[in-house]
Image (cartoon, rainbow, N blue to C red):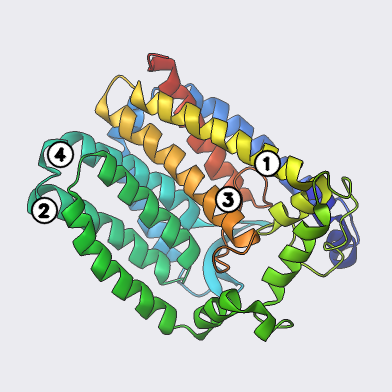
């Protein structure tokens, strides 16, 4: 799908139709190696180094803001250049925070019903990471991080009344973040009525729907998409599911969603059957992160929510996202070795 979605733009921009494919194959090789390597590491090891991992992630989030170190793309200074490649620290922060929060919740689960001793400290930790990510700013990644961590805290047994109180504050803060950035307001208005500005803010949503519509039940055939001919911006990243739906149709799109559903089901089973609380929170946090990201990406593509800039795990082009996801799956596979399934 990376090649099918990208070869037109790759040929035009770089004179090499295989440009994105070759880089993604390299990312895949690194990701697969990392997955199998991490799979061999007992998951309890991450508990020992959770503070160091989170501290490194926070340092990288601050480093990306320094001129000359951080790289700006699409209005967000979220990248650090490493030779010919770049890494996105906010992606790795999601996993680092999941590991640390799993340690915190496993040690303090008996206090989680207490606002002062359990709920509030965990919330402060999550919003500290969210705040650093928003300095870039990267609202999409921040939303995934917040929702994942809220799910973990809820699973730990936090009171619903505490969530309602924090949700009130969170909604107010979320509205402020939207109103403070004109491009976020334009995304909301484009979502509500994309035809109001079909050549501007509504362009991506309209072109995404134009891709899905002709796909029908069976699709137009692999490689035969029309929207990738410079109609749909960046078809190999955030909107790759639109190209997949156009070429493979409703059946192809449903099959991909079903595979993600299978991953979610297996991940939840691994978490439930984990031998200790740390393994349980870690597994459920990882599978929640992947599932939330899938739900947001697909919802954007089919026009259910505004454009967020969230990639589709495993399928979208990008080294940081793919490597992070493969590393997360490596940890999940190691937990499964000890689970009673």
User: Element at badge 1?
Assistant: helix
The residue nearer to you, when weighing 317 against 249, is: 249
Q: Which residue is mark 1?
A: 254
Q: Residue at x 35, y 80 (%)?
A: 176
Q: Is residue 262 left or right of residue 198?
A: left
- Give percent across and percent down for residue 326: 56, 37
Vertical comparison of 23 with 178: above or below? above
Disc 4/disc 1 C-alpha distance (Å):
40 Å
Q: Are marks 3 and 1 in contact (CB under 8 Å)?
A: no
Instruction: Please give the name of the residue rendered at 89% of the width and 66% of the height, measured from the top-left corner.
Output: 12
The Cα atoms of the two marked residues, 3 and 2, are separated by 35 Å
Question: Picture coordinates of residue 199 (x, y %)?
Answer: 74, 83
From what the image shows, is residue 185 above or below residue 312?
Answer: below
> In the rendered structure, which disc, 2 or 1, sits on the residue that comes first in sequence?
2
Give the mark toward the camera: 3 or 1. Answer: 1
Is the residue under label 2 in contact with that under label 4 (CB below 8 Å)? Answer: no
Disc on res. 115: 2
Circle 3 or circle 2, nearest the eye: 2
Pointer 2 local density, CA inside 10 Å: few below 14, some 14–19, many at least 20: some
């Amino acid at each position: 799908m990376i090649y099918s979605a990208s070869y037109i733009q790759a040929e035009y921009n770089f004179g090499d139709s295989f440009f994105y494919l070759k880089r993604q194959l390299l990312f895949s090789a690194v990701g697969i190696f990392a997955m199998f390597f991490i799979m061999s590491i007992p998951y309890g090891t991450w508990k020992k180094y959770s503070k160091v991992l989170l501290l490194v992630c926070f340092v990288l989030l601050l480093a990306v803001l320094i001129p000359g170190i951080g790289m700006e793309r699409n209005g967000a200074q979220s990248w650090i250049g490493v030779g010919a490649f770049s890494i996105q620290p906010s992606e790795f922060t999601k996993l680092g925070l999941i590991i640390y929060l799993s340690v915190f919740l496993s040690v303090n689960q008996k206090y989680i019903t207490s606002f002062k001793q359990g709920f509030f400290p965990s919330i402060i930790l999550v919003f500290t990471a969210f705040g650093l990510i928003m300095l870039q700013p990267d609202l999409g990644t921040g939303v995934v991080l917040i929702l994942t961590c809220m799910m973990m805290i809820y699973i730990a047994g936090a009171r619903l009344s505490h969530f309602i109180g924090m949700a009130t504050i969170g909604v107010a803060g979320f509205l402020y973040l939207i109103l403070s950035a004109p491009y976020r307001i334009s995304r909301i208005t484009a979502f509500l009525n994309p035809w109001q500005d079909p050549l501007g803010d509504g362009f991506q949503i309209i072109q995404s729907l134009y891709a899905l519509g002709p796909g029908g039940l069976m699709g137009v055939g692999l490689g035969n998409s029309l929207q990738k001919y410079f109609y749909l911006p960046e078809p190999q990243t955030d909107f790759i599911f639109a190209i997949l739906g156009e070429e493979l149709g409703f059946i192809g799109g449903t099959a991909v969603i079903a595979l993600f559903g299978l991953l979610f089901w297996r991940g939840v089973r691994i978490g439930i059957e984990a031998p200790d609380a740390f393994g349980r929170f870690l597994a459920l946090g990882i599978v929640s992160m992947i599932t939330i990201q899938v739900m947001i990406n697909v919802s954007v593509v089919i026009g259910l929510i505004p454009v967020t800039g969230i990639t589709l795990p495993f399928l979208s082009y990008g080294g940081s996202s793919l490597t992070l996801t493969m590393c997360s799956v490596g940890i999940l596979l190691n937990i499964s070795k000890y689970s009673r399934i």
